[in-house]
């Protein structure tokens, strides 16, 4: 009798082990609820006009969502403070002084490639959706072992690389449509207006660009919460590729690209089922940390990243 019981327990154990291995092949065990991650990059918005402003008057929606999310007050681009290098640091977890015209792919594989490979997902679930056409290079890398493989889908600029920028509203509509029709799972979205207006030395349009993107972000969040596919299992991250020169340094908000605090100090705001709520972290974090933090949430590793997981923003 005793042997029989032991045998049957052994049998159950085997079945459980088999089931676990069967599942873990496709979906590595994760402690988290996050199944989908959307990253929004507000191009070239300076910290002093977003979270650094005491009134938060240009980001009212993000500020109101803080009660359900996290904000990191010491978040930096510690690499090259321009568009393609900043986005590359976010997507690969490695700083590199990448050509900023779209003429060069990042050296290392991205979170999109690691995610698509790990979970064997179709590439219409991972997206780079950008107002700037030159960011299409985020869809691939130069690493010979990865080049041309596990590439995310792209919708960048007018009609892809080399076709020029479009308006942010076009990007907004594209994202909103794809959230509904494709149920995209992992995406990076770029909005250009703050950066473009800054370069044009148009401070009113620069601030309006920050207000408009805040509105887009709020609408994305509302859309995610009203769709059962996304609700309570989707993380939204808002950050910048770079800031702009500190007021009084060179031409101030017009340009960027050096290592002054205005260029390096950027936003990190996140909201989702696995983050603390109403939490402000003063821990120093940086752009390359986003890659492994997303990997941690979604259950894949990014071995080429130099970043660290942003542990204190997670729920205990
Ligand atoms: Zn710029
Ligand atoms: Zn600067």
Image (spheres, grey):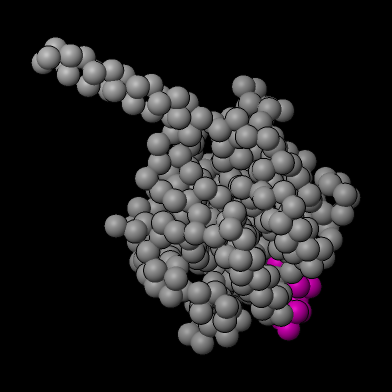
Per the image, is 148 magenta?
A: no
Q: Is residue 72 left or right of residue 254?
A: left
Q: Residue furthest top?
A: 3
Residue at 50% of width from left, 54% of height from top?
233
- Percent coordinates x, y for residue 122 in the rendering: 68, 35
18 and 183: which is toward the camera: 18
**106 w.r.t. 39: above or below:** above
Q: Is residue 65 visible?
A: yes
Q: Which residues are magenta?
A: 195-205
Quadrant where the image shows the N terminus = top left
- Percent coordinates x, y for residue 219 in the rendering: 66, 71
Q: Is residue 139 left or right of residue 271?
A: right
**146 w.r.t. 307: above or below:** above
228 and 225: which is toward the camera: 228
Magenta span main SS: helix
Per the image, is 199 magenta?
A: yes
245 and 19: which is toward the camera: 19
Q: Based on the displayed image, in which of its 4 quarters is residue 248 positioned?
A: bottom right
Q: Residue furthest left?
A: 2
Residue at 38% of width from left, 21% of height from top?
18
Q: Based on the displayed image, in which of its 4 quarters is residue 67 positioned?
A: bottom left
**60 w.r.t. 268: above or below:** below
Residue at 40% of width from left, 41% of height from top?
30
Quadrant where the image shows the C terminus = bottom left
Q: Is residue 234 left or right of residue 107?
A: left
User: Total marks drawn?
Assistant: 0
């Amino acid at each position: 009798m005793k042997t029989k019981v032991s045998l049957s327990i052994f049998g159950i154990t085997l079945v459980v082990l088999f089931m676990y291995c069967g599942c873990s092949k496709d979906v590595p065990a994760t402690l988290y609820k996050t199944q989908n991650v959307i990253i929004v990059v507000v191009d070239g918005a300076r910290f002093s006009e977003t979270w650094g402003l005491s009134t938060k008057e240009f980001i009212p929606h993000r500020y109101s969502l803080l009660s359900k999310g996290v904000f990191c007050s010491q978040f930096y681009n510690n690499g090259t403070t321009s568009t393609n290098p900043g986005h590359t640091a976010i997507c690969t977890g490695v700083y590199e002084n990448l050509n900023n015209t779209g003429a060069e792919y990042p050296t290392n594989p991205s979170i999109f490639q690691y995610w698509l490979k790990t979970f064997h997902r179709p590439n219409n679930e991972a997206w780079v959706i950008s107002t700037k056409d030159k960011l299409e290079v985020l869809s691939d890398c130069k690493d010979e072992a990865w080049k041309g493989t596990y590439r995310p889908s792209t919708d960048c600029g007018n009609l892809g690389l080399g076709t020029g920028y479009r308006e942010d509203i076009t990007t907004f509509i594209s994202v909103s449509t794809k959230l509904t029709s494709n149920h995209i799972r992992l995406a990076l979205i770029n909005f250009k207006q703050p950066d473009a207006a800054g370069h044009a030395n148009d401070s009113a349009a620069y601030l309006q660009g920050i207000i408009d993107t805040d509105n887009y972000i709020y609408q994305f969040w509302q859309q995610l919460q009203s769709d059962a596919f996304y609700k309570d299992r989707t993380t939204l991250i808002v950050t910048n590729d770079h800031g702009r020169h500190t007021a009084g340094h060179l031409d101030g908000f017009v340009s960027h690209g050096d290592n002054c605090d205005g260029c390096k100090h950027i936003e990190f705001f996140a909201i989702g089922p696995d983050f603390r709520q109403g939490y402000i972290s003063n821990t120093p974090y940086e752009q390359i940390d986003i890659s492994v933090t997303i990997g941690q949430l979604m259950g894949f590793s990014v071995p080429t990243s130099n970043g660290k997981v942003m542990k204190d923003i997670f729920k205990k």
